Image: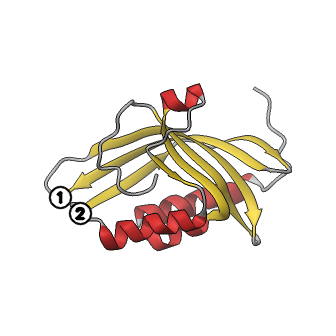
C-alpha cells in the first residue's frame, strides 16, 4: 500500500479533532457537540444495507448545525430515559483523500453503554465516513456518516456517535 500525500491539514490536527470530539461526547458535554460541525453539514447514522444501496433512509439524520442543536435540546430538556454511560472506541484513523473540498477520513467505531443495573453492552459497531474542512480557523466536520453493521440497533441509541 502506498502512502497518501496529504495536501490539507496534517494528520496530528485531524487526530486532535477526533480526540476532542470523542472526549466531548464521552464526557457528556452535549452542548459542545454541534460546534464540531460546519453550519451547513450532514450527520447521518445509517444501516450498512441502506448505505451500500445508496438509500438515504437513516436512523438519525441532521442537515445543519441548528438541527444538531435541536437534537441536544431534545436530549437534555425533553426526553426521559434511564441514566447511562456511553464510551466510544474508535479504530485506527485512515485519511482516504485530501483535496480542495476537504479531507475524507474513515475509521471503525465501537460504542458501548452501561446502565447502573446492567452489564455493559455493545450499542453500535460501525464505520465512520467523514469529510473534514477548515472553517472559522479550525477543523470541523462537513459530513459525518456513521454506517452501522447490524440491521437493527438497540432503541437505546440516545446520544450521538
Report the mark closest to the observer, 2 or 1: 2
Question: How far apart are the two marked residues, 2 and 1, measured between alpha carbons?
Answer: 7 Å
Q: Is residue 43 above or below residue 83?
A: above
Q: Is residue 50 above or below residue 19?
A: above
What is the secondary structure assignment of the residue under circle 2? loop
Which residue is the site of mark 1?
116
Q: Earlier in the sequence, mark 2 or mark 1?
A: 2
Residue 69 x %, y %: 50, 69
Q: Is residue 22 above or below residue 32?
A: above
User: Contact (CB < 8 A) between labels 2 and 1?
Assistant: yes
Q: Is residue 18 above or below residue 44?
A: below
Residue 153 x %, y %: 34, 39
What is the secondary structure assignment of the residue under circle 1? loop
Residue 48 x %, y %: 50, 31
Q: Which mark is residue 83?
A: 2
Residue positioned 36% across, 66% down in the render: 75
Residue positioned 38% across, 54% down in the render: 87
Horizontal side of 144 relative to 3 (left or right) equals left
Residue 30 x %, y %: 44, 69
Horizontal side of 158 relative to 66 (left or right) equals left
Amino acid at each position: 500500500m502506498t502512502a497518501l500525500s496529504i495536501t490539507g491539514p496534517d494528520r496530528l490536527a485531524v487526530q486532535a479533532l477526533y480526540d476532542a470530539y470523542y472526549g466531548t461526547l464521552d464526557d457528556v458535554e452535549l452542548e459542545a457537540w454541534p460546534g464540531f460541525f460546519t453550519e451547513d453539514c450532514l450527520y447521518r447514522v445509517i444501516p450498512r444495507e441502506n448505505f451500500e444501496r445508496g438509500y438515504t433512509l437513516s436512523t438519525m439524520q441532521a442537515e445543519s448545525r441548528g438541527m444538531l442543536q435541536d437534537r441536544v435540546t431534545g436530549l437534555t430538556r425533553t426526553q426521559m430515559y434511564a441514566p447511562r454511560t456511553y464510551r466510544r472506541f474508535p479504530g485506527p484513523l485512515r485519511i482516504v483523500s485530501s483535496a480542495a473540498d476537504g479531507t475524507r477520513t474513515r475509521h471503525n467505531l465501537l460504542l458501548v453503554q452501561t446502565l447502573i443495573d446492567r452489564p455493559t453492552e455493545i450499542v453500535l459497531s460501525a464505520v465512520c465516513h467523514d469529510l473534514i474542512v477548515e472553517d472559522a480557523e479550525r477543523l470541523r466536520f462537513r459530513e459525518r456518516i456513521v454506517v452501522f453493521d447490524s440491521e437493527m440497533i438497540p432503541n437505546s441509541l440516545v446520544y450521538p456517535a
